[in-house]
Amino acid sequence: MEVPERGRRAEAPWKKLSKETATKRARATRSNLLHVPYGDGEGENLDIYFPERVSEASPFCVFFHGGYWQSGSKDTSAFMVNPLTAQGVAVVIVAYDIAPKGTLDQMVDQVTRSIVYIQKQYPRNEGIYLCGHSAGAHLAAMMLLADWTKHAVAPNLRGFFLVSGIYDLEPIVFTSQNGPLLMTLEDARRNGPQQLLEAALTQPVDPACHVLVIVGQHDSPEFARQSREFYQTLCRGGWNASFEELHDVDHFEIIWKLTQDDYVLTQMILRTILQEP
């Protein structure tokens, strides 16, 4: 599942902004709590960005970065902060231990505990919405199958935005991408939302919880295939799911453009969270 460059065009100014300065701008212009620990591990922390009218009853959009579980950071992933906080949505950017330090099992556990932390810290929230890109979409998708009972809390999950995600991990076992992960076939099956959902056909806790599966027009064929198959599996399982292929964006542009207020995905996320038609 290598991501091809596909003859990339010269970078537009918004791309440079999103990659180099979006997080700095968000931290400078939005009320925030940075590097908040959600666990005892060194890498278990998150950033919370608040809307102008800070309220514990705000909706929260929780973002998990991509990078094939071996790169990326919350400290360069605040793409959506300004557009969403401007509309009253609190944004949480979560760090997790990437490979080789972290295993897939650990990452899934960390993401689970980060959501538990938000729910316990802000129990009056108007909904927790999970957004992940690429490997982050995989981690978000695993939350569809999470066992919350052992955490003694039921997070108020209202929606999922799964952007250019990876849902079947088995093909990665035999590629160079698996070098830092050291993932076995058993690891891939235990942490593969596609296979887990097919086997369990887990019924949604809240039938109104909306799962939006999104892929870019210029994503690789494998990302497109996995996104469509995961969407179809969700539908068979009774989830309130929809599928969107976004025009004229590739695997990276699809998430970087969330810095833009008028970007189609920004508007989809806001309409879902604000429950607008």
Image: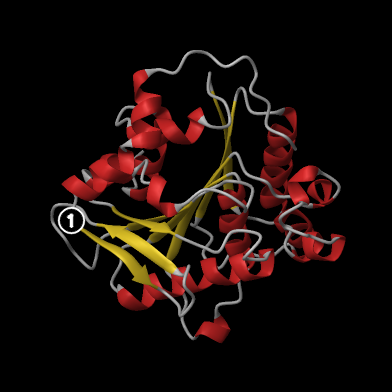
Residue 155 is left or right of residue 213, and the answer is left
Residue 90: x, y in percent? 28, 56
**Quarter residue 218 falls in:** top right
Residue 238 is left or right of residue 32, and the answer is right
> How many residues crowd around disc 1 within 10 Å: few (fewer than 14), some, or many (20 or more)?
some
Vertically, is 122 above or below 209? below
Could one spot residue 105 in this view of the protein? yes
The residue sitting at 62% across, 53% down in the picture is 69
The residue sitting at 86% across, 47% down in the picture is 174
Residue type of the residue flagged with mark 1:
Ser
Could one spot residue 199 in this view of the protein? no
**Quarter residue 163 falls in:** top right
Residue 129: x, y in percent? 43, 56
From the viewer's side, name the closer residue of 246 and 204. 246
Task: Determine which residue is flagged by label 1.
Answer: 31
Residue 193: x, y in percent? 70, 57
